[in-house]
């Protein structure tokens, strides 16, 4: 047996129902396979996803735990030692350059610079936030930490 000899089992493949294509299709004509009356026979009929016929839905019955802060801001983080490796002296570091070098994944997220490692080159770093240590190290190396 070879790959090109493989076939589906007889009777396992069915033709697609072509609903609403006239009486000759077997599913067409008057009610188009929806039955006579009721919610599901109407256009736009049916219920929303997760609806349980008026019974309290499962997502409301399950107990909720913890706290979700809707105003939380999540930052993409870059460390000072990464800037030391990837940039040369007097470069301007922006979120766009970090994205281009794939140091930051998500373009629409704000960037925070953290203070892990050492830096010896003067860099102008533009980011949304800076850790206290990161700012101190960048400025000690002769660079500037600018908040966007």
Image: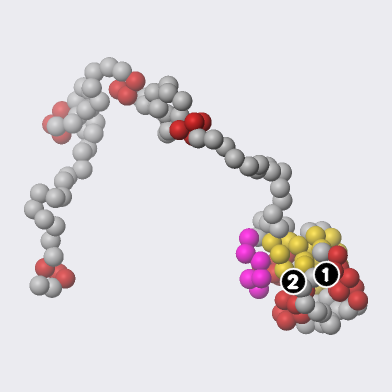
The image quadrant of residue 142 is bottom right
Question: Can residue 70 be seen here?
Answer: yes
Q: Which residues are magenta?
A: 101-106
Q: Main secondary structure of the magenta part?
A: loop
**Residue drawn at 11 percent across, 68 percent down:** 5
Image position, residue 4 (x, y; %): 14, 69
Indicate which disc, 2 or 1, sits on the residue closer to the N terminus: 2
Image position, residue 136 (x, y; %): 89, 70
* Number of the label disc, if any, that sits on residue 134: 1
Image position, residue 75 (x, y; %): 71, 58
Q: Secondary structure at mark 1?
A: helix
Q: Quadrant of the N terminus?
A: bottom left
**Residue drawn at 83 percent across, 69 percent down:** 134
Residue 55 falls left or right of residue 116:
left
Q: Do residues under tags 2 and 1 come within 8 Å of each other at their CB atoms?
A: yes
What whole-number distance in Å separates the C-alpha atoms at marks 2 and 1? 8 Å
Q: Is residue 49 above or below residue 31?
A: below
**Residue drawn at 79 percent across, 59 percent down:** 128
**Residue drawn at 42 percent across, 21 percent down:** 54
Q: How many marks?
A: 2
Label 2 belongs to which residue?
Answer: 79
Residue 86 falls left or right of residue 54:
right
Q: Secondary structure at mark 2?
A: strand
Classify mark 1: residues with Cα within 10 Å, few (<14), some (14-19) or many (20+). many
Question: Can residue 87 be seen here?
Answer: no
Q: Is residue 138 above or below residue 49?
A: below
Taking depth in this image into account, of 17 and 131 the one nearest to the observer is 131
Q: Is residue 37 above or below residue 48?
A: above
């Amino acid at each position: 047996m070879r790959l090109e000899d493989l076939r589906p089992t007889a009777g396992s493949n069915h033709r697609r129902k072509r609903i609403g294509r006239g009486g000759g299709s077997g599913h067409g004509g008057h009610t188009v396979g929806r039955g006579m009356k009721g919610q599901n026979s109407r256009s736009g009929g049916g219920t929303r996803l997760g609806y349980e016929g008026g019974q309290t839905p499962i997502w409301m019955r399950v107990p909720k735990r913890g706290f979700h802060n809707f105003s939380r801001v999540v930052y993409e983080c870059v460390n000072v030692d990464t800037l030391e490796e990837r940039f040369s002296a007097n470069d301007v570091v922006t979120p766009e350059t970090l994205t281009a070098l794939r140091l930051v994944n998500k373009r629409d997220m704000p960037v925070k610079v953290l203070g892990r490692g050492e830096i010896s080159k003067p860099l102008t770093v533009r980011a949304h936030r800076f850790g206290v240590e990161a700012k101190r190290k960048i400025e000690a190396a002769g660079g500037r930490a600018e908040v966007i």
